[in-house]
C-alpha cells in the first residue's frame, strides 16, 4: 500500500487513486496529419522502464485532480508530485 | 493421499556459453525452453543457447497459477491456445517427465445477464473453433464443483458458467524442467545467471548479445522475456506496446481434496484450483500501476480473498501460507505479440499477460517455426506488432479472465 | 495421574482454572494459560501428528509459531485445519486431532465475524521481548508520539511502558511499501465456544507507521542427525520455555545436543527442576560438556525417544533437546525490502540496510546470540534418508543431495524439487539447514547458496480474516433508486447492472418472465407504461467552453444545440471503438446535461475529467455527477401524453408546443421537474426528472394518474425488447469494445465536418476503414416462434463441416416480440448491411437455424409513432 502525495490533498493511500500510466504523452495537435504508424504509436506505445517512470495519477476518491509523479517501478518509491 | 511423484535423477545440463550460436533465446522461462526444444526437435536446429539472467524458469514460470485452457474468444486465440492444449495432452510422454498434467476442467462463472451472453457467445465460438466447450446452468455448475455457492442470494449470484472439460492444471516447475532436460539432451545449451546487457549490431542487423558472461554472437536473437521484454527492447530502440505489472498469487495450507476442478470468475474476481499436494492455488487481478517488483499490495489480496470466501464459503478457515508476485507484460488488446520486429536478426515473443503458462508448448512450437523459417507460423501470424498500426486487434479482455 | 509432567510450582499457568480438552481419542486436562502443546506435554503426550509423506510419528519441536511438526486439526467448537499445537490456546471443550499433513474444511458456513481496522503511529514496535519493550519505552518518551507495541503471545504480566498501546495475541504478518504493515489479532479464539458471536474472532490491523522497530527475536535451529524427527526431540529453547512459561517438564532424562553455549543455561535450569541432563557438545573445545566433540549418531524408539547413541555409547533418555544456533527472525525486514548478509560467526543472516524507515533490535539484530556457525552436517551415510531437514515436508538430507545430484544448483530449485520450506512454517527452522545441506553437497558455503525469498504472510492467515467484513451483503455496495422499495413490494426480480439493482420485470400472479414481459411490452406499445430510469448516468457540464468540450468528445456536434433541445450522442475511445452513448440536453448557453449508460456513468465522468485536466486545461468547463441527485421516470406509450397532462396541468404537452427531442421545466405532480421528450422505445415518451427525494412521490402520482388508463410498470427486460425492436443498440450488449459507430449503423451520428473528435483518427486506419467489417443487423428466424440464443454464432453455409469453422458473427440480442408477432434478433455480422435479404444460419451447439438478414430497425422504421 503505497503512499502517494496528492498535490492538493497531501499524502494518501494508493487505494484513493486511479492510475493513468506514463505522463507527458500529449494528444497530437492534428491527428489527421499523422501516418497510421505514428497514430498507432501514440495510441498504444508507452514507456515501460524498469526504474523511474514519470506517470500520471488521479485522486479519484478525493479531489479528483490529475497530477504526475516520478515513481520507481522496482522499489515503488514516489518522488514529488507535479 | 496424493503426493508429488518421485523426481527424476537428472535434470538439464548446465552449459558454459560458447562464442556464438545459430539461435540465442533470451529468457529461460517456459516459453524460451519450449522454443529451444522445438527448434531442435522440429527443425533440427540444435546450435541454440537459452540465456537466463537468474535461476532457470524462476520468473513467471515459477509464479503462475498453472491453469491450462484454450477457450478464448477469437479464432486467432483459440487457434494457438488449442494447439497448445493438444500438445499438453501428450507432453508428459513427449518429454519423458512427470508434469502432473490434470484435465480436471475449467469453469468460468457468469454473474450477470451480460456475462451469460458473453459466456454463451464464447462457448459457441469455441465449438466452431474445435475447442471443447459447454454452457452450464447453476445446478450443473454445482454438480461439477459442489463447493461453489450457487445461492441466488449472493450479491452477484452465479447465473451459469462456461465449462471446458479438457482444461486443467499442470506443475509449472516440472514443465520447465522437462523442456529444459529434453532440449539439453538434444544439444541446446542452457546458461543460467547470464543477463543480457546489450545487443551487438552491424548494419542495423542484430548479430549478438552482450551479457554478464561475455559477448555471444547469434544469427538470430529471439526474445522471450515476458515482463522484462521492454527492458531488452529499449536496448535496441524497439518500442513495444507493453506495460509491466505485478500479478499476485497465493497458496493455502494443504487440505484434503475439496475442490475438484478449476473455477474462474471475473465479476467476483478470483480464480482457484487445488493442486496435487492439496494446497489451494489462487490468483486475481493485477496491481494497477507499472511494476517490476515481483510483489504487490495487500489490498489486492484482501479483495481476492473476499471474493474467494463469497464464492466458496467452505474456504473461510483455510489459511494463506504464501503470497508472491510475477511481472506480467500486458499488451493493449490482452493478446500476445509474436514474430518479426522490423530489426533483422531479432524476433520477439511477449505480451502474454496472464495467459503465458497455458500457451507454453503451443508458443514454443510456433515461435520455433517463426525463428527457423524467418516467417510467422500461421497460428501466430495474427499476433504481429503491425496490428497496432492497422487496428486489427485481437481483443481478449473479456476472455483473459484477469481484469487488466 | 493427571498431568504427570507438570512441575509443582514453575510456570505462569493459572492452576485455579483447570480446563478439559480432547486430543484424538483422549480426554485430558490442562490449565488456563496452556497451549495445546504444553497441555499435551504436561500429560506426557509427545506424539501429536504423522508426517505427510512417510507417515512417521511426529512430536512437538518448538514452543511457538515456528513449529515445523505439531500440526493439528481443530474439530470443535469449529473446524479449522493445520494449526500448530504450539500456538493453540487451550479452552474448555477444545477438540483437536492429529493430522497427517493435510487438514480439512468444515462443510458448514463459518458463523464467526471478522473485521479490519486502521491504525497510525509514529513508531511501531514488533515484539514485546526485552528489546521491544525497551524500544517502545524509548519511543514513548518522545512527547506526542503514538507508539504501538505488537506481540504475538497472550497478555503477560510484563511491564508495558506508559503511553504505549499494546496489542497482544497479534502477529504482524506483512510489511509492505511505505511502512504499511498488516497484523492479525486473535480476539476470541482462546475462548472456545464461549466466544461471543458478535465479537470479531480475528481482526486485521492495517498499520501505517512513521518508523518501525523490529524486535522479532530469533528462531533456534535443529541439528541434523538420523531419526531427528522422533517425538521427544525438540529445540532446547523450547524445553526451557515449557518449563518457564507453563511449568511443564518435557522429559525426566534429557540429552542436550548442542553446538553453542546456550545449552548450558538450559541444562542448569532443567537440572534445577529435577531433570537428569547430559550435555553433548559437537565442539571438541567444550569444557563444560559431559560429552565434548560428540556426534549424535542414532535415536532409539519409534513413537517416542527412548534413548540415543552418542559419542560411541548408548544413553537412556526420554527427551533430546537440540540447539544448532539461532537465526534472527528477519522475515518482515526482508519483506520491507531490507537486504540480508550472511554472518559466518552466527551462521545466520543479519540485517544489512533497508530503504524503508526500519531498525532491527535485540536478537533479531544478532544481539546476544551465541557464536556458533552453522549446524554441523553429518557425513554422507545410509541414514541420510532418515535425517530430516524439513520435518513438515518430510525432506531429508538424502533428498536434498538427490536434487543437487540431479544437477540443480539454486536453492530455489532445490526447494521446488524437494518441497523443502513450502509448508505451513515456510521453513522457519529449516531454511538455513536446507541451504547448509546444499552448500555441503556442492562444496560451497551457506553464504553463497543463500536462502529463498521471504514472502508474506509471516504466519498462516485464514481466508476469512483477510476477507473481513466484505462478505455477503457487504461484498459490494448495492446502489438502490429512491423507488426501489416499490419495486420490491411489487415482487420484481432485480438485475445487477454495475452496482445498481434494477427492476427486471414485474410478474403478476402466475406469470413467468416471458408472460410479464409480453404484457409490459404490449402496454408500452398500445397503452401507457412507465419505468424507473433513475440509474441512468447524469453529468452536469457547465462553463463557457462546454459546447466546444462536448464537440471534442462526441462524434456529432453538440455546440450547435439550441437551448431547450436534446441530441443523441456517441462517444468513442481513442481507438475509435464505441465507448458510450446517451443524450445531451442544452440547459442554458453554457450548461449541458449529459446522460450516460447506467454501467458507464463513472467511467464517462472520469473520461471527461481526464481530457479536461490533462489535455485541455484551458477550456473553461466543469463537470459534476448528478446521477444520484435526480430520480427519473420514463412515461411511455400512446397514452403517455394524457397521463402527463393530468399530472402537469400547466405544461403544454401537444406536439407543437413540446416536440420530440426537447426538454421543459415543469411542475409534475406538484413537484419541480425537468421533462425530456426523448424515447428509447420509439413510442411517444417522456423522461420526467425530479429531485431524488421526490422520486417515490412522482412514481406513485404517475401510477395513480395512469390507473384508469391501465398504466403498467415495466422493467429492464421490456426496455431491452422495445429498444431492440427499434434497432437501438445497448453499449456493452450489442458492442464489445471492437465496434465502431458505423458498425452499429450510427454513421449518421458522425459529423461531416473534418473537425477532430476523440477517436476520429482511428476510424481511418486500414482495419477500421474496411467495408467488410461486422455490422449490426436484424435476424428473423424462418420459424417465427423460434428464439435464438444470445451468443449464437452466424455462418453462411450448411452443413457446418469440420472445425475450425469460419463464422460471420454472433447474436447480440434476441427476444420474442409482441409488436412484430414473432421472434427476432440483433447480430453483428460480417458485411451485414450488404447481406440484407440473405439467408444465413445461426448455430447453437452444432444445430443450424435458418435466418434471414434484415435491417436492424424492425419496428416502425419510418418513426411514425414517436409523436403518439
Image (cartoon, rainbow, N blue to C red):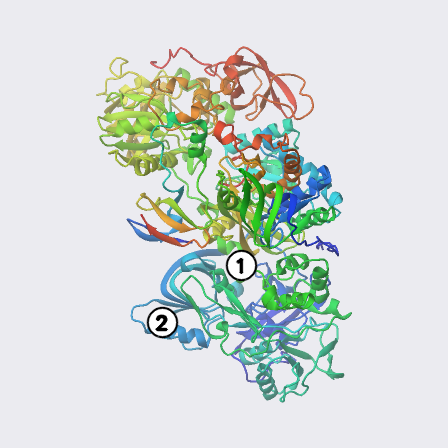
Residue B166's image quarter?
A: top right
Q: Is residue C422 visible?
A: no
Q: How many neighbours does mark 2 have within 10 angstroms: few (below 14), some (14-19), or many (20 or more)? A: many
Is residue C413 placed above or below C747 in the rendered structure? below
Let me know if residue C59 appears in the view: yes
Q: Which subunit holds the residue at mark 2?
A: C
The relative height of residue A49 versus residue B121 in the rendered view (above or below) is below
Q: Is residue B209 left or right of residue C716?
A: right
Which residue is label 2 attached to? C139
Could you say where residue C12 lies in the image, as x and y percent from the top left?
51, 79
The spot of residue B363 in percent (x, y) is 63, 38
Q: Are marks 1 and 2 on the same chain?
A: yes
Q: Position of residue C810 (x, y in %)?
A: 55, 23
Of marks 1 and 2, which one's residue comes earlier in the chain?
2
> Left or right: C627 with respect to C779?
left
**C458 to the left or right of B42:** left
Distance from Cα at disc 1 to Cα at disc 2: 28 Å
Q: Residue at horizontal 52%, vertical 74%?
A: C33
Name which quarter of the figure residue C159 lies in. bottom left
Name the foreground residue: C656 vs B26: B26
**Cβ atoms under marks 1 and 2 closer than 8 Å:** no
Please tell me the numbered disc located at residue C455: 1
Q: Residue C345: give x, y in percent of width and height.
A: 56, 76
Secondary structure type for disc 2 = helix
Residue C800 drawn above or below residue C77 = above
Amino acid at each position: 500500500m503505497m503512499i502517494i502525495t496528492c498535490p492538493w490533498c497531501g499524502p494518501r493511500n494508493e487505494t484513493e487513486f486511479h492510475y493513468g500510466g506514463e505522463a507527458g504523452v500529449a494528444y497530437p495537435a492534428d491527428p489527421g496529419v499523422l501516418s497510421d504508424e505514428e497514430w498507432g504509436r501514440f495510441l498504444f506505445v508507452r514507456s515501460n522502464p524498469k526504474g523511474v517512470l514519470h506517470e500520471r495519477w488521479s485522486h479519484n476518491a478525493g479531489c479528483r485532480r490529475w497530477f504526475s509523479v516520478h515513481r520507481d517501478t522496482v522499489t515503488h518509491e514516489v518522488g514529488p508530485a507535479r | 493421499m496424493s503426493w508429488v511423484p518421485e523426481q527424476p535423477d537428472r535434470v538439464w545440463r548446465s552449459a558454459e556459453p560458447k562464442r556464438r550460436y545459430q539461435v540465442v533465446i533470451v529468457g529461460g522461462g517456459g516459453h524460451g525452453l519450449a522454443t529451444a526444444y522445438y527448434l531442435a526437435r522440429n527443425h533440427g536446429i540444435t546450435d541454440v543457447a537459452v540465456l537466463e539472467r537468474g535461476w532457470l524458469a524462476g520468473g513467471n514460470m515459477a509464479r503462475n497459477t498453472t491453469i491450462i485452457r484454450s477457450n478464448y474468444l477469437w479464432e486467432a486465440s483459440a487457434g494457438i491456445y488449442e494447439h497448445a492444449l493438444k500438445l499438453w495432452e501428450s507432453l508428459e510422454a513427449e518429454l519423458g517427465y512427470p508434469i502432473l498434467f490434470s484435465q480436471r476442467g475449467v469453469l468460468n462463472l457468469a454473474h450477470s445477464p451480460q456475462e451469460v451472453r458473453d459466456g454463451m457467445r464464447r462457448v459457441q465460438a469455441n465449438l466452431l473453433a474445435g475447442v471443447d466447450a459447454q454452457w452450464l446452468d447453476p445446478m450443473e455448475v454445482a454438480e461439477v464443483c459442489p463447493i461453489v455457492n450457487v445461492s441466488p442470494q449472493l450479491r452477484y449470484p452465479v447465473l451459469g458458467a462456461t465449462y471446458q472439460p479438457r482444461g486443467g492444471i499442470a506443475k509449472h516447475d516440472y514443465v520447465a524442467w522437462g523442456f529444459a532436460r529434453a532440449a539439453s539432451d538434444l544439444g541446446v545449451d542452457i546458461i543460467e545467471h547470464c543477463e543480457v546487457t546489450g545487443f551487438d549490431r552491424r548494419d542495423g542487423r542484430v548479430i549478438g548479445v552482450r551479457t554478464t558472461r561475455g559477448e555471444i554472437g547469434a544469427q538470430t536473437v529471439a526474445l522471450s522475456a515476458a515482463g522484462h521484454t521492454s527492458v531488452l527492447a529499449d536496448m535496441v530502440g524497439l518500442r513495444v506496446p507493453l506495460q509491466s505489472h505485478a500479478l499476485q498469487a497465493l497458496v493455502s495450507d494443504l487440505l484434503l481434496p475439496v475442490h475438484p476442478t478449476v473455477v474462474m470468475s471475473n465479476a467476483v474476481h478470483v480464480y482457484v484450483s487445488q493442486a496435487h499436494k492439496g494446497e489451494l492455488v489462487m490468483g486475481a487481478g493485477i496491481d494497477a500501476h507499472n511494476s517490476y517488483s515481483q510483489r504487490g499490495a495487500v489490498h489486492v489480496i484482501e479483495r481476492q480473498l473476499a471474493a474467494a470466501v463469497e464464492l466458496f464459503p467452505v474456504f473461510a478457515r483455510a489459511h494463506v501460507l504464501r503470497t508472491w508476485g510475477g511481472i506480467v507484460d500486458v499488451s493493449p488488446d490482452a493478446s500476445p505479440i509474436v514474430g518479426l520486429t522490423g530489426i533483422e536478426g531479432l524476433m520477439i515473443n511477449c505480451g502474454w499477460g496472464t495467459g503465458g503458462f497455458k500457451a507454453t508448448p503451443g508458443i514454443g512450437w510456433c515461435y520455433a517455426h517463426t525463428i527457423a523459417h524467418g516467417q510467422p507460423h500461421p497460428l501466430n501470424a495474427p499476433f504481429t506488432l503491425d496490428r497496432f498500426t492497422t487496428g486489427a486487434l485481437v481483443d481478449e479482455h473479456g476472455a483473459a479472465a484477469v481484469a487488466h | 495421574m493427571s498431568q504427570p509432567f507438570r512441575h509443582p510450582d514453575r510456570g505462569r499457568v493459572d492452576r485455579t482454572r483447570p480446563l478439559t480438552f480432547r486430543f484424538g481419542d483422549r480426554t485430558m486436562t490442562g490449565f488456563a494459560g496452556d497451549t495445546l502443546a504444553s497441555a499435551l506435554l504436561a500429560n506426557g503426550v509427545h506424539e501429536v501428528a504423522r508426517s505427510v509423506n512417510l507417515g512417521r510419528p511426529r512430536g512437538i519441536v518448538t514452543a511457538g509459531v515456528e513449529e515445523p511438526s505439531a500440526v493439528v486439526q481443530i474439530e470443535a467448537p469449529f473446524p479449522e485445519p493445520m494449526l500448530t499445537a504450539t500456538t493453540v490456546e487451550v479452552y474448555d471443550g477444545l477438540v483437536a486431532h492429529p493430522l497427517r499433513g493435510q487438514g480439512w474444511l468444515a462443510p458448514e458456513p463459518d458463523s464467526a465475524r471478522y473485521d479490519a481496522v486502521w491504525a497510525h503511529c509514529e513508531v511501531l514496535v514488533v515484539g514485546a521481548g526485552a528489546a521491544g519493550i525497551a524500544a517502545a519505552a524509548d519511543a514513548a518518551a518522545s512527547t506526542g508520539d503514538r507508539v504501538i507495541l505488537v506481540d504475538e503471545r497472550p497478555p503477560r504480566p510484563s511491564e508495558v511502558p506508559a503511553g504505549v498501546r499494546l496489542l497482544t495475541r497479534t502477529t504482524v504478518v506483512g510489511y509492505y511499501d511505505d511502512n504499511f504493515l498488516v497484523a492479525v489479532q486473535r480476539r476470541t479464539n482462546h475462548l472456545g465456544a464461549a466466544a461471543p458471536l458478535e465479537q470479531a474472532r480475528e481482526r486485521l490491523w492495517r498499520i501505517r507507521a512513521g518508523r518501525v522497530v523490529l524486535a522479532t527475536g530469533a528462531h533456534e535451529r535443529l541439528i541434523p542427525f538420523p531419526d531427528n524427527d522422533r517425538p521427544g526431540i525438540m529445540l532446547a529453547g523450547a524445553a526451557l520455555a515449557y518449563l518457564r512459561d507453563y511449568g511443564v517438564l518435557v522429559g525426566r532424562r534429557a540429552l542436550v545436543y548442542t553446538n553453542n553455549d546456550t545449552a548450558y543455561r538450559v541444562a542448569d535450569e532443567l537440572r534445577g527442576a529435577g531433570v537428569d541432563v547430559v550435555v553433548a557438545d559437537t565442539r571438541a573445545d567444550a569444557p563444560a560438556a559431559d560429552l565434548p566433540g560428540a556426534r549424535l549418531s542414532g535415536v532409539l524408539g519409534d513413537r517416542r525417544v527412548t534413548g540415543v547413541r552418542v559419542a560411541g555409547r548408548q544413553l537412556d533418555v526420554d527427551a533430546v533437546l537440540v540447539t544448532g544456533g539461532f537465526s534472527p527472525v528477519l522475515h518482515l525486514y526482508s519483506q520491507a525490502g531490507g537486504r540480508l548478509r550472511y554472518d559466518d560467526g552466527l551462521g545466520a543472516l543479519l540485517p544489512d540496510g533497508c530503504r524503508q524507515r526500519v531498525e532491527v533490535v535485540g536478537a533479531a539484530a544478532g544481539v546476544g546470540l551465541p557464536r556458533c556457525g552453522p549446524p554441523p552436517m553429518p557425513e554422507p551415510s545410509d541414514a541420510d534418508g532418515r535425517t530430516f531437514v524439513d520435518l513438515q515436508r518430510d525432506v531429508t538430507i538424502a533428498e536434498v543431495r538427490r536434487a543437487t545430484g540431479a544437477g540443480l544448483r539454486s536453492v530455489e530449485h532445490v526447494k521446488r524439487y524437494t518441497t523443502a520450506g513450502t509448508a505451513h512454517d515456510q521453513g522457519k527452522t529449516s531454511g538455513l539447514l536446507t541451504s547448509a545441506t546444499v552448500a555441503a553437497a556442492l562444496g560451497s558455503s551457506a553464504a553463497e547458496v543463500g536462502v529463498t525469498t521471504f514472502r508474506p504472510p509471516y504466519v498462516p492467515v485464514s481466508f476469512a480474516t483477510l476477507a473481513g467484513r466484505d462478505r455477503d451483503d457487504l461484498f459490494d455496495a448495492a446502489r438502490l433508486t429512491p423507488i426501489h422499495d416499490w419495486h420490491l413490494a411489487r415482487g420484481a426480480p432485480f438485475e445487477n447492472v454495475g452496482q445498481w439493482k434494477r427492476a427486471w420485470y414485474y410478474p403478476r400472479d402466475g406469470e413467468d418472465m416471458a408472460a410479464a414481459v409480453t404484457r409490459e411490452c404490449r402496454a408500452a406499445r398500445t397503452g401507457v407504461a412507465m419505468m424507473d430510469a433513475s440509474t441512468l448516468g447524469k453529468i452536469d457540464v457547465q462553463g463557457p467552453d462546454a459546447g466546444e468540450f462536448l464537440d471534442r468528445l462526441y462524434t456529432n456536434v453538440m455546440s450547435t444545440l439550441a437551448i431547450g433541445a436534446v441530441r443523441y450522442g456517441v462517444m468513442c475511445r481513442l481507438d475509435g471503438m464505441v465507448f458510450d452513448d446517451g443524450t445531451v440536453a442544452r440547459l442554458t448557453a453554457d450548461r449541458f446535461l449529459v446522460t450516460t449508460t447506467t454501467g458507464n456513468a463513472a467511467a464517462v465522468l472520469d473520461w471527461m475529467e481526464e481530457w479536461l485536466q490533462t489535455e485541455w486545461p484551458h477550456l473553461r468547463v466543469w463537470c459534476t455527477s448528478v446521477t444520484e441527485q435526480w430520480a427519473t421516470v420514463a412515461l411511455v406509450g400512446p397514452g403517455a401524453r394524457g397521463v402527463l397532462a393530468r399530472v402537469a396541468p400547466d405544461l403544454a404537452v401537444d406536439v407543437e408546443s413540446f416536440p420530440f427531442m426537447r426538454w421543459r421545466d415543469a411542475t409534475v405532480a406538484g413537484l419541480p421537474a425537468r421533462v425530456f421528450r426523448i424515447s428509447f422505445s420509439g413510442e411517444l415518451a417522456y423522461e420526467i426528472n425530479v429531485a431524488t427525494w421526490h422520486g417515490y412521490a412522482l412514481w406513485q402520482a404517475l401510477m395513480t394518474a395512469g390507473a384508469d388508463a391501465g398504466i403498467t410498470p415495466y422493467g429492464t427486460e421490456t426496455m431491452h425488447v422495445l429498444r431492440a425492436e427499434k434497432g437501438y443498440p445497448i453499449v456493452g450488449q450489442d458492442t464489445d469494445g471492437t465496434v465502431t459507430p458505423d458498425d452499429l449503423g450510427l454513421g449518421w451520428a458522425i459529423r461531416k465536418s473534418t473537425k477532430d473528435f476523440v477517436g476520429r483518427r482511428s476510424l481511418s486506419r486500414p482495419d477500421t476503414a474496411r467495408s467488410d467489417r461486422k455490422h449490426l443487423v436484424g435476424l428473423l428466424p424462418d420459424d417465427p416462434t423460434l428464439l435464438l440464443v444470445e451468443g449464437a454464432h452466424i455462418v453462411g453455409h450448411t452443413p457446418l463441416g469440420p472445425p475450425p469453422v469460419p463464422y460471420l458473427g454472433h447474436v447480440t440480442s434476441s427476444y420474442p416480440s409482441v409488436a412484430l408477432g414473432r421472434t427476432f434478433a440483433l447480430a453483428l455480422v460480417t458485411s451485414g448491411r450488404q447481406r440484407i435479404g440473405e439467408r444465413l444460419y445461426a448455430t447453437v451447439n452444432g444445430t443450424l437455424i435458418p435466418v434471414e438478414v434484415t435491417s436492424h430497425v424492425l419496428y416502425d422504421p419510418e418513426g411514425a409513432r414517436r409523436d403518439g
